């Protein structure tokens, strides 16, 4: 009799073959960017739920190195959440011809200035998506992992007038490197500028004078690839802009391994948050048991779904007692992490194994 593990392996191979990728069949479709100048020669995918909200929000998602848009979506669970809550997703995608490791070029001056290179390509894609899907331009957000997180910070810095908020996962501050060697030094946490210079870098990146987008920063304390010092530098970069440099932090711990530090304005609004995950390595924090996302390369199951937290903080999903924005949000709730049970039956064991293999949601 064929073992359960062998059956799952064969199913996974078959489904990967059908998808043409190492992930289940994608919900994403290609976005035609031929009408724009696309100076960064990027490609793009989108996800549009059916039905979408009227004048929906847009979330721009930037994958990490060696990843594709489909792989990052499968691991993070963004399209699952968008399907349930009616917002649109845009996934700019790097081409191997631009970077051998498929990293966004977050440190190249020609790709990180307003109106140039990859930053301009992403901005053109956002404009196209906003027109095509009747996006509410007051609800455009961006997130990314690693090089994608650093590039998300590039977009927040160079087009702060476009975004209501951003979430940077295992990323780096804006404009701290301009060569490959400098990029590696900054990734190790070496040579990072002072807080005043970090904030000045953003002020000089565009003619915008504020208000500034809200920013959350996510990082694992055990990250061996991008030093945690970069997370603290990003926090300082944005605190200086929001005027919370002298504000005392407010801390909480939603889970035992998840520590949140917030810097609040006088009205109680916190424009900058830092999420620290104890012991987590380099990647996006997910909670595979809640059904939102899947374990994979740089998708780390630490019992915390960054996707769910980020969407809640942006008002795109039911949020810690906050009033929903839409009927879709009223009628659909985020999946909760199941409570542990004393024992599992054979059906539970099979279903959990299929979910781990990415064959069931």
Image (cartoon, helix red, strand yellow):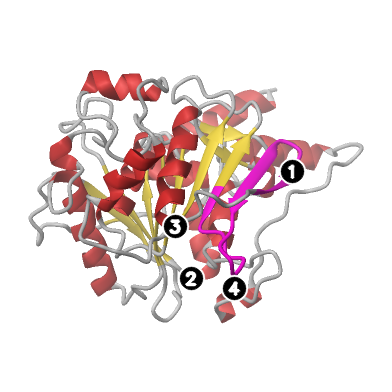
| Label drawn at residue 329 | 4
Q: Which residues are magenta?
A: 250-273
**Residue 343 vertical placement versus 337 (above, below):** above
Select label 3 or label 1 by which is in front.
Answer: 3
Disc nearer the start of the sequence (2/3):
2
Which numbered disc covers residue 242? 3
- Dot placed on the residue nearer the N-terminal end, 4 or 2: 2
Whether pointer 4 and pointer 2 mark residues with C-beta atoms closer than 8 Å, the reply is yes
**Residues at discs 1 and 4 in contact (Cβ within 8 Å):** no
Q: Position of residue 86 (x, y in %)?
A: 48, 70
What secondary structure is found at the residue carrying circle 2? loop
Q: Earlier in the sequence, mark 1 or mark 2?
A: 2
Can residue 24 be spotted in the picture?
no
Residue 86 - label: 2
Report x, y in % for residue 47: 38, 60
Mark in the foreground, 1 or 4: 1
Which image quadrant for residue 288? top right
Using residue 72 as the reference point, say whether residue 359 is left or right of it.
right
Question: Which element carries disc 1, helix, strand or loop?
Answer: strand
Alpha carbons under labels 4 and 2: distance apart: 8 Å
- In the picture of the structure, the residue carrying the numbered disc 1 is 255
Task: Note whether 114 is above or below 20 in the view shown.
Answer: below
> Can I make out residue 28 in this image?
yes
Query: Residue at left 61%, top 75%?
Result: 324
């Amino acid at each position: 009799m064929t073992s359960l593990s062998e059956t799952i392996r064969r199913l996974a191979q078959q489904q990967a073959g059908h998808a043409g990728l190492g992930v289940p069949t994608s919900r994403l479709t290609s976005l035609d960017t031929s009408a724009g100048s696309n100076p960064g020669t990027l490609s793009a995918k989108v996800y549009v739920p059916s039905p979408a909200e009227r004048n929906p929000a847009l979330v721009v998602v930037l994958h990490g190195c060696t990843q594709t848009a489909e792989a990052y979506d499968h691991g993070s669970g963004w399209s699952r959440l968008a399907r349930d809550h009616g917002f649109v997703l845009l996934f700019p995608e790097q081409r191997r011809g631009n970077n051998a490791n498929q990293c966004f070029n977050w440190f190249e001056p020609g790709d990180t200035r307003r109106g140039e290179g990859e930053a301009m390509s992403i901005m053109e894609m956002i404009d196209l998506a906003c027109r095509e899907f009747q996006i509410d331009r007051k609800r455009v957000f961006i997130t990314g992992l690693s090089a994608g997180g650093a590039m998300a910070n590039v977009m927040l810095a160079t087009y702060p007038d476009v975004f209501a908020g951003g979430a940077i996962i295992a990323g780096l501050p804006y404009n701290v490197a301009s060569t490959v060697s400098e990029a590696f030094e900054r990734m190790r946490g070496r040579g990072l500028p002072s807080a005043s210079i970090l904030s000045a870098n953003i002020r000089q990146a565009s003619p915008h004078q504020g208000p500034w987008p809200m920013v959350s920063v996510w990082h694992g304390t055990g990250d061996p690839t991008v030093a945690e010092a970069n997370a603290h530098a990003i926090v300082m970069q944005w605190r200086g802009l929001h005027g919370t440099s002298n504000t005392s932090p407010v801390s909480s711990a939603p889970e035992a391994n998840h520590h949140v530090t917030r810097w609040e304005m006088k009205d109680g609004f916190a424009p900058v948050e830092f999420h620290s995950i104890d012991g987590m390595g380099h990647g996006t924090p997910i909670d595979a048991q809640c059904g939102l996302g899947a374990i994979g390369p740089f998708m780390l199951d630490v019992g915390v779904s960054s996707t769910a937290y980020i969407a809640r903080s942006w008002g795109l999903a039911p949020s810690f007692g906050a009033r929903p924005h839409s009927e879709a949000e009223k009628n659909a709730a985020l999946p909760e992490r199941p409570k542990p049970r004393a024992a599992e039956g054979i059906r539970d064991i099979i279903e959990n194994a299929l979910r781990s293999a990415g064959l069931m949601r």
